[in-house]
């Protein structure tokens, strides 16, 4: 059995969970409460020395880490439905759009970074939220500049890993009270992709370790 | 002719320049002084709306952006020498190691982020340097945990995109005065890979837009 090491708030895990759903890969989740430091236990460090989720265990000799590396592995080993375009230039475009979130935005707002902002610069919770909101807005502007009018997917007509990244970006933006009003093309894609059953079912709020009553603004993402 | 839009200090461009060298792809560089805001000209924004280097123009209908997306495209279109392992699990490992730099480290230390630290938290140059050094040390620790004793490459015996990422990480670490003393396995890989002619020739300090007299500590990376 494939095990997805996860935490409900983790946007990177959410991207992988969507792909597993879409490709019909059977998996079990093992949750780790990152707010309680459970990523630092010896047992979890044996799975991923970096102490981060997601990690995908059981399919390869060593557990897989980093959402993009896991998604590329899934694409190679479970190619249907394809989440990358058939042409090399299209794949490059989709990967670049994925990295707007996974490199240019998400790493700037994870808890370990906001902890450093607090420690080094005395950034309080409000400042941490505004910091995160700033980078989500920057990412939304980058997507808006790349999307054609009327698009329902990030690239062409077919769902790709770029849409998975955008979905995670949208959840992060909402968590930090960023409105989509200034990003109408992003909002148009959002209205389409967030309804897809495999994406909707992967939502952080629906995971087994999510609190019953949501109070997540400013808490994440992880 | 393929054009690599670049800036000498850019570590992401450096990763791509190495791969072009290794694969023997003919290219010209077009340099943009990011310290003077040249990435914000209308001409460059037409190449990359995000205003970032590297961008690879002339090989595809639209310019390619994001170092990992460009490297994957190069691997697909110019497969020799391979910079990804032959097996899917190996490829996943190498991509994850690439992302230690390209996602977990580098996006945290680029000028736009340090500008925000200054604007929001009053971080002076020293604080910006120490911020960057912190994340380079974190990345070095992550590589050190993954490398076997005596390794001369990040994965197996063959150069891969993980080594390109590590090479850029090493240059960034040096720029911020981070010593390798605590990372002996990283230092061992470094001693081997940094001597490879195609890597040595790609070094930021040797590029045509690099200043004649180097005074780069705390200036970058871009």
Image: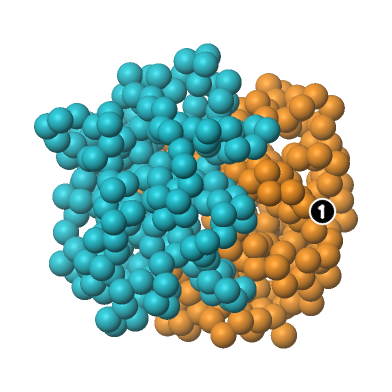
Chain colours: A cyan, B orange
Q: Residue B124 falls in which quadrant of the image?
A: top left
x and y, in percent, of residue A142 in the image: 36, 67
Q: Quadrant of the N terminus of chain B?
A: bottom right
Front residue of this view, candidates B115 and B16 = B16
Mark 1 residue element: helix
- Residue A209 visible? The answer is yes
Residue furthest to the left in view is: A213
Viewer-proximal residue among A192 and B52:
A192
Residue A113 image offset from top left, x and y in percent = 39, 35
Which residue is at a point 22% across and 40% down the rendered structure image?
A: A205
Task: Residue A174: give x, y in percent of width and height.
Answer: 20, 51
Q: Is residue B204 left or right of residue B38?
A: right
**Residue A47 on image: x %, y %:** 56, 25
**Rendered image quadrant of residue B14:** bottom right
Residue denoted by label 1: B200
Label total for image = 1
Q: Chain of mark 1?
A: B
Q: Name the residue: 47% across, 15% down.
A: A41
Q: Residue at x 54, y 21 (%)?
A: A45
Q: Is residue B113 left or right of residue A47?
A: left
Query: Is the residue A28 above or below the residue B7 in the image?
Result: above
- Quarter of the picture containing the C terminus of chain B is bottom right
* B187 versus B220 height, above or below: above
Say if A31 sits above or below B158 in the image. above
In the image: residue B112, left or right of residue B80: left
């Amino acid at each position: 059995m494939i095990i997805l090491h996860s935490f409900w708030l983790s946007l990177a895990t959410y991207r992988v969970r969507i792909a597993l759903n879409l490709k019909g890969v059977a998996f079990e989740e093992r949750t780790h409460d990152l707010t309680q430091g459970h990523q630092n236990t010896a047992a979890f460090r044996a799975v991923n020395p970096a102490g981060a989720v997601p990690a995908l265990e059981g399919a390869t000799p060593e557990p897989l880490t980093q959402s993009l590396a896991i998604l590329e592995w899934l694409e190679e080993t479970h190619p249907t439905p394809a989440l990358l375009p058939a042409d090399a230039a299209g794949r490059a475009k989709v990967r670049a759009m994925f990295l707007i979130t996974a490199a240019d935005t998400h790493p700037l707002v994870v808890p370990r970074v906001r902890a450093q902002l607090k420690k080094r610069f005395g950034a309080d919770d409000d400042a941490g939220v505004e910091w995160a909101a700033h980078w989500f807005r920057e990412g939304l502007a980058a997507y808006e500049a790349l999307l054609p009018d009327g698009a329902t997917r990030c690239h062409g007509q077919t769902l790709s890993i770029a849409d998975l990244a955008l979905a995670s970006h949208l959840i992060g933006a909402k968590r930090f009270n960023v409105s989509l009003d200034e990003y109408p093309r992003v909002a148009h894609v959002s209205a389409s992709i967030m309804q897809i059953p495999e994406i909707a079912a992967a939502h952080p709020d629906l995971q087994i370790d999510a609190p019953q009553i949501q109070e997540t603004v400013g808490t994440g993402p992880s």
